[in-house]
Image: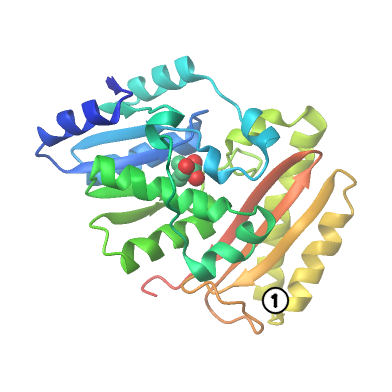
Amino acid sequence: MKIIKNIFEFIEYRNKLSKKIALVPTMGSIHEGHLSLVDTAKQYGEIIIATIFINPMQFNSSEDYKSYPKDFDQDKEILQNKGVDILFCPSISEIYPDGFDTTIKVDFLSELLEGKYRKDHMEGVATVVTKLFNIILPDYAIFGEKDFQQLLLIKSFVKDLNVPVKIISSKTIRDKDGLALSSRNIKLNPDERNIATEINKSLIMGVEKILLGEKNSKNIIEYIKIYLSSFNLIKIEYISIRNPKNFEVINKINKEFVILIAVYVGNIRLIDNIIIEEKNG
Ligand code: PAF
């Protein structure tokens, strides 16, 4: 695996490549979820490029940024063993040199849920991903469904700005007990880790209730809220039911919907969702 830290060097190297490139952008702390993105990337690209860049612009608190898990040596080894061809891992000053003054904002998707509770987060994601696309010029880029709002945001600016990359979504990977894999999970203590499984459980309970005939979103949200509130370690930030295509709020649940949840388990913020879509929808 070739490791490149410098943008200029990367572009020189990239210019010599003529095969289809699939990109897996990450913030490191690589887990099975990222590796499944690499597996998806291999279905599309002939050359797999991963990036590791912990993007300060998408953290709304410097404490959260500083405490974000990092283990570059281990990440490097895992990605190499997984068959990644190139690892691009620029420094902060490479990506945000002095005088950097541009932000990409997707109006609707930047303001709600993740954007509302993590101020400037969505702009930070859109800006860094745009930069990575412009530097790497991938044919495909793979993003996980766990960050569903992020996935829609990226699809949205790629379409609006005619960015020549195909966005591929990849299913959420879960531990055996249902907890969605996240780099933040390693920060949970054993009690918190145990309780965190309730998030996925509550989403499944919500869908089961819908299948039993409850179509009013408010009632489903209330049902999930009551369930999750019974766990002292869980503090709910939002529960929302939306259209998985345009992210509009759904009041009366029909065939397609996504239930999105953000909670704190202890001090650790976790998000998850469950997506119900028609096959050819
Ligand atoms: O999902 C992530 O890990 C990050 O938001 C991303 C897409 C790598 C941008 O920093």
Tag count in the figure?
Answer: 1
x, y percent for residue 217: 70, 77
Q: Camera-side residue: 148 or 191?
A: 148
Quadrant of the frame with the C terminus: bottom left
Can see residue 139? yes
Residue 138, quarter of picture = top left
Q: Residue at x 27, y 59 (%)?
A: 163
Measured from the top left, where is residue 243 in percent x and y?
54, 74
The residue positioned 58% from the left and 53% from the top of the image is 120
Give 26 or 272, whichever is nearer the viewer. Answer: 26
Q: To which residue does mark 1 refer? A: 212
Other residues around mark 1 within 10 Å, as few (<14) / some (14–19) / many (≥20): few
Q: Is residue 275 above or below residue 248?
A: above
Up/down of 63 relative to 146, above or below: above
Q: Is residue 204 above or below residue 52?
A: below
Q: Which residue is drawn at the image coordinates 55% and 45% (left, top)?
A: 58
Please identify the quarter of the rendering in which residue 39 is found: top left
Q: Is residue 135 above or below residue 16?
A: below
Farthest bottom residue in view: 252
* For residue 235, side relative to residue 91 (left or right): right
Q: Is 113 situated left or right of 235 in this image?
A: left
Determine the residue located farthest toward the front in the rendered image: 99
Residue 239: x %, y % from top left = 71, 63
Badge 1 marks a residue whose secondary structure is: loop
The figure's colour scheme reads rainbow
Report if the beta carbon of the residue with label 1 is closer than 8 angstroms to ligand 1: no
Percent of width and height locating residue 204: 67, 59
Left or right of residue 60: residue 170: left
Q: Residue at x 65, y 43 (%)?
A: 179
Residue type, numbered disc 1: Leu
